[in-house]
Image (spheres, rainbow, N blue to C red):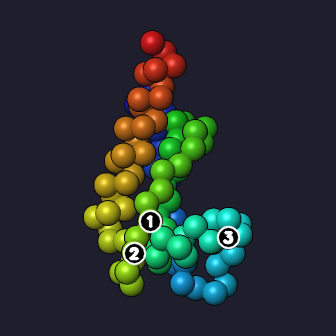
Amino acid sequence: FMAALVETPSHTIDLTDPAVRLRPWAADFHRRMGHEFLLRVPVTLGARVLGFVGVCFRGACPPTAGKVEVLKALATQAALSLELTRLG
């Protein structure tokens, strides 16, 4: 099933951008926590999206390419773990 893993894009959200629309409860949570950026990466297996992992960042520095790669690796490991659990 390793061949079934596909490359999926990450998604960075600038929470300080007034054009960004979040659900009211999510916007309130991120504002209270001081988050300025949100990085989301889908957890996929083949064409199936199983969920996503996300990391919030405080401060005015968007996620670096290295942080994106680490989160993608974590998402891949999560997909593999879910599939192995299903098969086991």
- Looking at the image, which residue is at 34% across and 47% down? 73
Q: Residue 45: x, y in percent?
A: 52, 36
* Labelled pair 2, 1 in contact (Cβ < 8 Å): yes
- Amino acid carrying label 2: it is Arg
Q: Which of the marked residues, 3 or 1, is nearer the chain's N terminus? A: 3
Q: Nearer the viewer, residue 39 or 24?
A: 24
Q: Residue 72: x, y in percent?
A: 39, 52
- Looking at the image, which residue is at 48% across and 70% down? 33
Q: In the figure, 49 relative to 10: above or below?
A: above
The kind of secondary structure element at disc 2 is: strand
The kind of secondary structure element at disc 3 is: loop
Q: Residue 2: x, y in percent?
A: 40, 31
- Looking at the image, which residue is at 62% across and 71% down? 28
Is residue 71 among what the camera can see?
yes
Q: CA distance from mark 2 to mark 1?
A: 7 Å
User: What residue sits right under mark 2 in the picture?
Assistant: 58
User: What residue sits right under mark 1 in the picture?
Assistant: 56
Mark 1 is surrounded, within 10 Å at the Cα level, by few (under 14), some (14 to 19) or many (20 or more) other residues, namely some
Q: Which of the marked residues, 3 or 2, is nearer the chain's N terminus? A: 3
- Amino acid carrying label 1: it is Cys
- Amino acid carrying label 3: it is Leu
Res 22 label: 3
Q: State which quarter of the image contains the N terminus.
A: top left
